[in-house]
Amino acid sequence: MTDDRARTTHFGFQTVGEDEKAGMVHGVFTRVASRYDLMNDLMSGGVHRVWKEAMMDWLAPRPGQRLLDVAGGTGDIAFRFLKRAPGAEAVVLDMTESMLVEGRKRAEAEDMADRLEWVVGDAMALPFPDGVFDVYTISFGIRNVTRIEKALGEAFRVLRHGGRLMVLEFSQLPNPALQWAYDRYSFNVIPALGQMVANDRESYQYLVESIRRFPDQESFATMIREAGFEQVRYRNLSMGIAALHSGWKL
């Protein structure tokens, strides 16, 4: 039998033990939590908000649904979901408690407190029984998971039959020239911005590298199908800088 402790994975461009990655990712998001929302606006020029609204448009939340937002951080997706779905409920799960603490400080969290739960947990071992959610979302988080296929398997497990998975993640531009230009921006501007705003160049260097290590749109769609999901589709956002992937548990 293979010893899991001997298995390796990537942390950005580094090769690390699988048993090390979760702690390293936790350290990154603990360090950036207080500036996370501000940095998202600065890095994307606010475009991440447009992408999240596009996610909600395709998802079309319905009244009474129960959402699990994994790697939900400061609650951006859950807040949007609940605003569009009267009577719906949302659970925001994140491995980094300090991210959830920042989310609970937001005005929306107080306004929606009776429909919102915050849970510290691991995407690869969700602390929920089978088939209890209508919708599973994860935004800009699945590339940080040690074993993506295990997280997708857990998503499938906790969804009800007829439930939907939706993933928003950075992806690959199909045009090589545009990808080259975007890489220049990512590797030169974002870590410098992280140093200036969050006093943390290293964490944002990792985040840029993790984007480049993430599978392209077709490869990730295949992973979703292999986890058991059907009717898997994706849509490129901003020419492929990000992509939305959708799948159903049927």
Image (tube, rainbow, N blue to C red):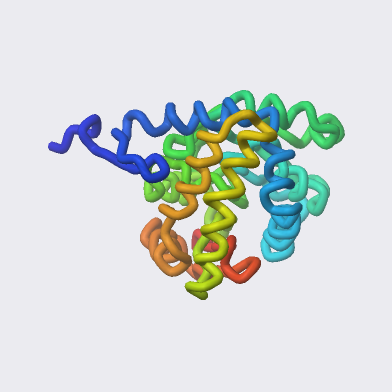
Name the residue at 65% across, 37% down: 91
Q: Quadrant of the N terminus?
A: top left
Q: Nearer the viewer, residue 53 or 118?
A: 53
Name the residue at 72% across, 46% down: 42
**Viewer can see residue 77:** no
169 shown above or below 195: below
Residue, far left = 1
Name the residue at 57% across, 26% down: 30
The location of residue 94, given as percent across then percent down, is: 57, 33
How many discs mark residues in the rendered view?
0
195 shown above or below 237: above
Quadrant of res 40 = top right
Q: Which of 44 and 149 is in front in this view?
A: 44
The location of residue 133, given as percent across then percent down, is: 59, 46
In this rendering, position of residue 135 left or right of residue 126: right
20 shown above or below 208: above
Q: Which of 12 and 134 is in front in this view?
A: 12
The location of residue 123, given as percent across then percent down, is: 48, 39
**Viewer can see residue 42:** yes
In this rendering, position of residue 13 left or right of residue 79: left
The location of residue 109, given as percent across then percent down, is: 79, 33
In this rendering, position of residue 14 left or right of residue 84: left
Name the residue at 82% across, 48% down: 83
Q: Which of 30 and 187 is in front in this view?
A: 187
